[in-house]
């Protein structure tokens, strides 16, 4: 994996991590702190083409290599919150090592968090997803899916919904500042991220309604290769940060940086991306049924409704009684209109988009580089990064006009034996100018990917499993592979 040096991983990090784990184990055993836990995991991967199948490597926070044969070793140690306390703190440290065709070592997680009630402030690198949907069996949320190595940041927000009006209203929010890597054309850039979600209905009500959004901005930094023009350095002061956060276009509120280029000064500072989400949850005694929609946006053109047909639509059904089938998830991802057509809603309300002739090339952020971190896509993995495709390439998304159907199903064969299956059938096309939705399948190339896995819990501490993945099509290299893994909970 090509990457710059991890800011949480100094040159002697292996020895520091080992010392931390040894000290923590000793401290935990001596103090018998029941809030601290540790585990180790090992996995062996192999395939006929030397490539790890798509659903074996996707949504794994970058911990599974694209190329195999080889092994993956993970070591995790952390302290949980004691929720009965008004104030408390927690932390996690997780190291990942690869050996074989790809050799590497880094800290997947390393953060410290403090809590007061449902509010928390944390700093470091932490596994997360953003959006409304099924987090356990999804094919990947649109904007922030858990596909890439976590971005280091400082975040203030709620760790759950704050309840108001005797529990009938809930609000969940986050606000953070992060530091990006230097793999793309811009170095020393920042991440601004925030989210706001609301809930109507008590958590235990028969029906809950949800709505909200997440907002990501890549901003600041400087060009890796200087060309002597206005795009060599991007403004990164507090005045720029004000416009990044508020997305206001009135440049008279606060004086803008004199180094701002025409795009920043005339439109928005940085590149903006996210999703506007709505969902409804039904909770009868026997099931939990979750319907959700994530409507994507880049820039402010979402208000013209030219991207309203593009997004992720899903339904998840959880069987509360358990059994052979305990959950089913079905999702449809469509990104082929790309802000270049007139929606029926826009026609009804007579909304005009002055930029309609322009294409929103999703995840390709122009001169700032693509929507990736450490060589992995941050958003849904179904929009495949070129470097992981059969066509090859760099850190862009050439075929990002996508329509895809995803099906996930899981269940139990016994109290200790669980199974899971993931299937996706996707079609990929290049961005093109059009003033109506795409209709011709000839515009697309096809891709089918699948995964079958079985996990068995041998004891309270020891579990293991096997997974088989396969890819067949024109976007990802054809392969069939197998992974065998074990997990041991130390305490």
Image: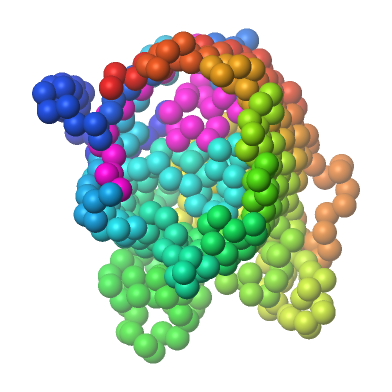
Q: Position of residue 421 (x, y in %)?
A: 67, 26
Q: Is residue 128 left or right of residue 314?
A: left
As displayed, is residue 195 above or below residue 182? Answer: below
Residue 134's quadrant in the figure?
Answer: top right
- Is residue 456 visible in the rendered image? The answer is yes
> Who is closer to the viewer here, 163 or 382?
163
Residue 97's quadrant in the figure?
Answer: top left
Q: Position of residue 470 (x, y in %)?
A: 67, 20
The type of colouring in the image is rainbow
Q: Identify the residue at horizontal 27%, vertical 44% (top origin).
A: 82
**Residue range of the region highlighted in magenta in the rendering:** 55-83
Q: Identify the residue at horizontal 54%, vertical 62% (top origin).
A: 202
Figure disc tally:
0
Q: Is residue 96 left or right of residue 69?
A: left
Residue 208's quadrant in the figure?
Answer: bottom right
As displayed, is residue 155 above or below residue 456? Answer: below
As displayed, is residue 482 above or below residue 353? Answer: above
Q: Is residue 59 magenta?
A: yes
Q: Is residue 198 left or right of residue 100?
A: right
Which residue is most to the front? Answer: 285
Q: Identify the residue at horizontal 32%, vertical 43% (top origin).
A: 125
Which part of the image, by quadrant, shows the C terminus?
A: top left
Q: Is residue 35 magenta?
A: no
Q: Position of residue 108 (x, y in %)?
A: 35, 34
- Is residue 121 visible in the rendered image? The answer is no
Which part of the image, by quadrant, shows the N terminus?
A: top left
Q: Identify the residue at horizontal 74%, vertical 61% (top origin).
A: 309
């Amino acid at each position: 994996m090509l990457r710059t040096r991890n800011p949480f991983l100094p040159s002697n990090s292996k020895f520091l991590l080992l010392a931390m784990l040894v000290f923590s184990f000793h401290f935990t055993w001596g103090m018998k702190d029941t809030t601290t836990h540790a585990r180790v995991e090992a996995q062996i991967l192999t395939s006929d083409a030397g490539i790890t199948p798509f659903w074996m490597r996707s949504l794994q926070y970058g911990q599974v290599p694209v190329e195999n044969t080889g092994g993956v070793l993970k070591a995790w140690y952390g302290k949980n919150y004691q929720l009965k306390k008004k104030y408390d703190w927690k932390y996690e440290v997780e190291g990942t090592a690869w050996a074989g065709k790809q050799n590497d070592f880094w800290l997947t997680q390393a953060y410290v968090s403090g809590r007061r009630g449902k509010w928390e402030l944390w700093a470091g690198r932490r596994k997360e997803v953003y959006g409304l949907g099924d987090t356990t069996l999804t094919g990947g949320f649109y904007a922030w899916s858990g596909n890439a190595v976590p971005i280091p940041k400082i975040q203030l927000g709620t760790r759950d919904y704050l309840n108001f009006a005797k529990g009938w209203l809930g609000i969940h929010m986050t606000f953070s500042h992060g530091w990006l890597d230097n793999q793309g054309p811009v170095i020393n850039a920042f991440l601004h991220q925030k989210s706001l979600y609301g809930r109507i209905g008590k958590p235990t009500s028969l029906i809950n309604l949800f709505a909200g959004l997440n907002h990501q901005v890549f901003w600041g930094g400087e060009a890796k290769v200087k060309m002597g023009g206005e795009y060599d350095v991007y403004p990164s002061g507090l005045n720029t940060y004000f416009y990044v956060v508020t997305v206001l276009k009135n440049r008279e509120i606060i004086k803008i940086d004199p180094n701002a280029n025409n795009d920043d000064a005339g439109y928005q500072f940085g590149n903006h991306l996210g999703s506007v989400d709505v969902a409804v949850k039904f909770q009868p005694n026997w099931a939990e049924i979750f319907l959700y929609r994530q409507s994507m946006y880049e820039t402010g053109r979402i208000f013209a409704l030219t991207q309203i047909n593009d997004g992720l639509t899903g339904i998840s059904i959880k069987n509360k009684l358990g059994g052979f089938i305990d959950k089913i998830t079905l999702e449809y991802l469509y990104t082929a209109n790309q802000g270049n057509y007139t929606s029926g809603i826009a026609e009804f309300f007579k909304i005009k988009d002055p930029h309609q002739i322009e294409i929103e090339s999703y995840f390709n952020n122009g001169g700032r580089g693509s929507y990736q971190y450490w060589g992995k896509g941050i958003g849904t993995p179904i929009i495949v990064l070129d470097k992981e495709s059969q066509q090859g390439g760099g850190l862009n998304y050439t075929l990002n006009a996508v329509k895809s159907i995803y099906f996930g199903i899981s269940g139990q064969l016994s109290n200790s034996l669980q199974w899971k299956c993931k299937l996706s059938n996707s079609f990929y096309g290049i961005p093109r100018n059009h003033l109506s939705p795409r209709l011709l399948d000839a515009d697309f190339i096809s891709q089918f990917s699948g995964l079958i896995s079985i996990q068995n819990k041998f004891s309270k501490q020891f579990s293991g499993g096997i997974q088989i993945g396969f890819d067949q099509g024109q976007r990802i290299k054809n392969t069939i592979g197998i992974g065998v893994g074990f997990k041991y909970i130390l305490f």
